[in-house]
Image: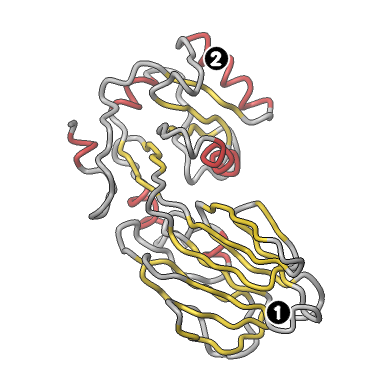
Amino acid sequence: MSESHADAETVPGDPPRRSYAEAEHVAFVAARTPAAQAARETLESLYPAKSPEDADVIVALGGDGFMLQTIHRFIRHGKPIYGMNRGSVGFMMNPYEAQDLLGQIRRAEVACLHPLRMVAHLDSGARVELLAMNEVSMLRQTRQAAKLRVHVDGVARLEEMICDGILVATPAGSTAYNLSAHGPILPLDAGVLALTPISVFRPRRWRGALIPRTAKVRIEVLEAEKRPVSAVADSTEVREVVEVEVEEDRDITVEVLFNAGQSLSERNLAEQFNF
């Protein structure tokens, strides 16, 4: 195992990780933007492309939103994903560089990420199960504030919260919506999730909590008919929910590759000093 892989971001209990020091075959997927499509054409002219099923690594060309789409699309394939920024923000992406792509991949550092599993119970009686890499959020659907009861590991920690919503964020997703809602940035190896309120009215002084990554969160919607609430797993929304259960799914591991010296842990740390 190369030094970069030995230093990769894992926590105790993560499954053994493959080495990509010998990676040869790549698959390219690209956003529909002109910049991403042009990059795909350039790279496919330089490197023989394989299908995602036959490749060692999937290369995603676009921005952070497309990276999230790619992870969801291939989450069951067990393939590592190396992103190259052809979008706007690019926090989860590496710089676009057509030359020495295989070298960059072989030297890359690996972040092993686990999604959140959301089970939403709807007013209709339906049950919807979704995965989220960044966060699960609950949001008011109308002008009226949501009224929620929050349980952690079977204990009601907040009997009643009046707010615009609440979210549960992973460490990898803590710099996204969670940060915009004034939640904390979480180190990847901290072993916690962020439970962050969105525009909370009561209890006025509550600013959120850090909970163990093993915690099971259950959120009840109070007065659901009068104050309807939706639940969102990353970008997939279900409406008129009455209860949502959230926990980390340790049985699913997504490997995301970052250029040597530019690991996701380093990016999360640097973001805390980015004013």
Q: Work out whether residue 129 or residue 138 is closer to the camera in this orientation and state it.
A: 129
**Residue at the front extreme?**
125
Say which quarter of the image contains residue 223. Answer: bottom right
Could you tell me how far apart the alpha carbons at marks 2 and 1 are, in whole angstroms?
A: 49 Å
Badge 1, how many Cα within 10 Å: few under 14, some, many 20+? many
Q: Residue at x 52, y 42 (%)?
A: 90
Q: Work out whether residue 195 or residue 273 is closer to the camera in this orientation and state it.
A: 195
Q: Nearer the viewer, mark 2 or mark 1?
A: 1
Colour theme: secondary structure
Amino acid type indicated by mark 1: Ala
Say which quarter of the image contains residue 203. Answer: bottom right
Amino acid type indicated by mark 2: Thr
Q: Which residue is mark 2?
A: 42
In the visual, does 153 lie left or right of 127? left
In the visual, does 122 lie left or right of 7? right
Q: Work out whether residue 61 or residue 78 is closer to the camera in this orientation and state it.
A: 78
Q: Are marks 2 and 1 in contact (CB under 8 Å)?
A: no
Q: Residue at x 63, y 31 (%)?
A: 31
Q: Residue at x 51, y 40 (%)?
A: 71
Q: Which residue is mark 1?
A: 146
Badge 2, how many Cα within 10 Å: few under 14, some, many 20+? few
Please state the horizontal and vertical placement of residue 95, each as a whole percent of the image: 46, 33
Q: Residue at x 64, y 68 (%)?
A: 138
Please state the horizontal and vertical placement of residue 69, each as a whole percent of the image: 59, 40
